[in-house]
Structures are given as structure tokens and as C-alpha cells.
């Protein structure tokens, strides 16, 4: 795994967008289309802002899948991840082929339908964040490292739900849904390339646990260390607790 550290969120986002754009262009050139999984959260804002203005991407040839979504939350709610996906990526690029995880619909039906579409062909590149509790997607610890299902219904732990309150999407924890639809860990690891964008001091402890501790369901993002083509983008704040290591590349 490659770890890159940048001085701030803006430079991190720009560099990550450059790598993502290269992967998208390459997939379109080689296979006629790019299949992408996109995370949407406050941590992804600078990255997505930079990605949508990258030149020479034929967005009509890009198919996008959603990473996770709350169950029971309407798309009009500020904390809805499908609302963010639409506003931050789809509407700004004109992408026409996208798969939303509808939190208002029957969760089992959504899991089955979008899962079939996702599993029909390999994913070229995946954009991830990492939670304060080390989760990837909504796979809170202890995460299920074994299920083969593309998507699953998960219970959200208190740390995860409190993070959403801290990011001001909800007034208090009572308003945060207790369940969500999440892409599974095994499915995440099937992408050809993974790009994890993880800025902010709030993520420093999770970064240290996942990338210097044991690979374990208790540190879900540690699973990314088993992927042959994963890059972790950090800023100085999220990298603050890491030891300096030979595999760390310092961004300008």
C-alpha cells in the first residue's frame, strides 16, 4: 500500500483527483467505459471538487455505484449520502449511468438489485473515506471480513453515529439512523484500484490503528493493506500519529 501525505486538504484533494482522473481515462481508453465506486461525505469534498473539473474525461462513459446509505433517510435530508453523490458528482459531470442506494425503499430489494448490477463486471477504481472508528463504508468494528455479498444491511455503532452528529448532519444522536446499507469489505477489495481520501485530525487515531496495528475486523480499514493497488491520501493532521516509514511518500 502506498501512503501519501500532503500539507492540507486542498493539496491532498487535488493530487488524489489527478490519480483518480488518470484511472478513469485509462479505463475508458482500454475498455470503453469506467466503472467507479464513490464515497460521499464531508471528508471527500475537496477531492470531488477537484475531480469534477479534471480535463478530458468523457463522463458519459462513466458508471457510478454508491458505497453506502442510511436506511430510512429521505434523499432530501442534508445527511443523505445519495443526495451528496448527486450534488457533488453526478449533477456536476452529467453522469447518466448511476446506481443509488435508496434508503427509503425496501432494504433487501435495494441490496439485491444494486448488488447484481455491481457484481456484473469489475470496478475500475473506488473512492473511499475512513471513519473515526476505522470503518470503510459503513462496516463498523467488528467488520464482517468474510461475507461474499456485494452489499449488506448493517447496524451502526455509537461511535459512527456520533461522528455524523459531529459533522453537523444531525442535531443529536437520536436523529441518526441505526441501520444502513453498506458495500461489504470483500466487495470493496475486489476493485482494480482503491483510492482512500482521509484528511483531518479526527481521523488520526483510526489511521494509526488501521495502518500500524494488526489487520483485524476491529480496525476495518486495515483490510486495505491486503489490496495490491491501494493508495491512502492523508494530510499532516490525519498522519500526525504515524511513525515515519519507508513506504510513506510526502506530497508537495
Image (tube, helix red, strand yellow):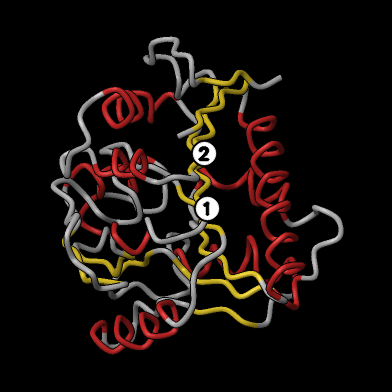
| Above or below, comparing residue 173 to residue 249 in the picture | below
- Estimate the spatial distance between the alpha carbons at disc 2 and disc 1, rounded to whole Å: 8 Å
Numbered mark located on residue 247 in the image: none
* Residue 73 spot, x, y in % from top left: 34, 72
Within-10-Å neighbours for mark 1: few <14, some 14–19, many 20+: many
Find numbered disc 2 in the image and state the secondary structure of the residue it sits on.
strand
Kindly indicate whether the residue at mark 1 contacts the one at mark 2 (C-beta within 8 angstroms): yes
Query: Camera-side residue: 135 or 195?
Result: 195
* Disc 1 element: strand
In the image, 228: left or right of 88? left
The quadrant holding residue 176 is bottom left
**What is the count of numbered marks?**
2
Q: Residues within 10 Å of mark 2 (few under 14, many from 20)?
A: many
Find disc 2 in the rendering and name its residue. Answer: 231
The residue lying at 31 percent from left, 72 percent from top is 150
The disc placed on residue 193 is: 1
Residue at 48% in and 14% down: 246
Where does residue 21 sit, x and y in percent of width and height? 72, 53
In the current view of this chain or complex, which residue is farthest to the right? 56
If the image is split into quadrants, where does the C terminus sit?
top right
Amino acid at each position: 500500500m502506498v501512503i501519501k501525505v500532503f500539507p492540507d486538504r486542498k493539496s491532498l484533494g487535488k493530487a488524489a483527483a489527478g490519480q483518480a482522473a488518470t484511472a478513469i481515462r485509462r479505463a475508458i481508453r482500454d475498455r470503453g467505459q469506467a466503472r467507479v465506486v464513490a464515497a460521499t461525505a464531508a471528508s471527500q469534498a475537496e477531492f470531488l471538487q477537484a475531480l469534477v473539473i479534471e480535463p478530458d474525461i468523457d463522463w458519459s462513459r462513466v458508471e457510478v455505484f454508491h458505497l453506502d446509505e442510511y436506511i430510512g433517510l429521505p434523499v432530501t435530508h442534508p445527511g443523505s449520502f445519495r443526495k451528496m453523490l448527486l450534488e457533488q458528482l453526478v449533477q456536476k459531470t452529467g453522469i447518466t449511468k448511476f446506481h443509488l442506494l435508496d434508503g427509503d425503499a425496501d432494504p433487501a430489494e435495494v441490496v439485491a438489485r444494486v448488488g447484481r448490477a455491481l457484481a456484473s463486471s469489475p470496478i475500475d477504481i473506488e473512492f473511499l473515506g475512513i471513519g473515526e472508528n476505522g470503518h470503510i463504508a459503513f462496516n463498523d468494528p467488528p467488520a464482517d471480513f468474510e461475507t461474499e455479498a456485494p452489499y449488506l444491511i448493517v447496524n451502526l455503532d455509537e461511535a459512527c453515529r456520533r461522528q455524523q452528529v459531529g459533522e453537523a448532519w444531525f442535531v443529536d444522536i437520536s436523529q441518526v439512523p441505526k441501520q444502513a446499507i453498506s458495500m461489504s469489505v470483500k466487495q470493496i477489495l475486489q476493485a482494480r484500484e482503491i483510492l482512500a481520501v482521509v484528511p483531518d485530525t479526527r481521523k488520526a487515531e483510526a489511521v494509526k490503528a488501521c495502518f500500524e496495528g494488526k489487520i483485524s475486523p476491529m480496525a476495518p480499514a486495515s483490510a486495505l493493506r491486503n489490496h495490491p493497488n491501494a493508495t491512502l491520501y492523508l494530510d499532516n493532521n490525519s498522519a500526525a500519529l504515524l511513525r515515519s516509514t519507508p513506504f510513506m511518500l510526502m506530497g508537495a
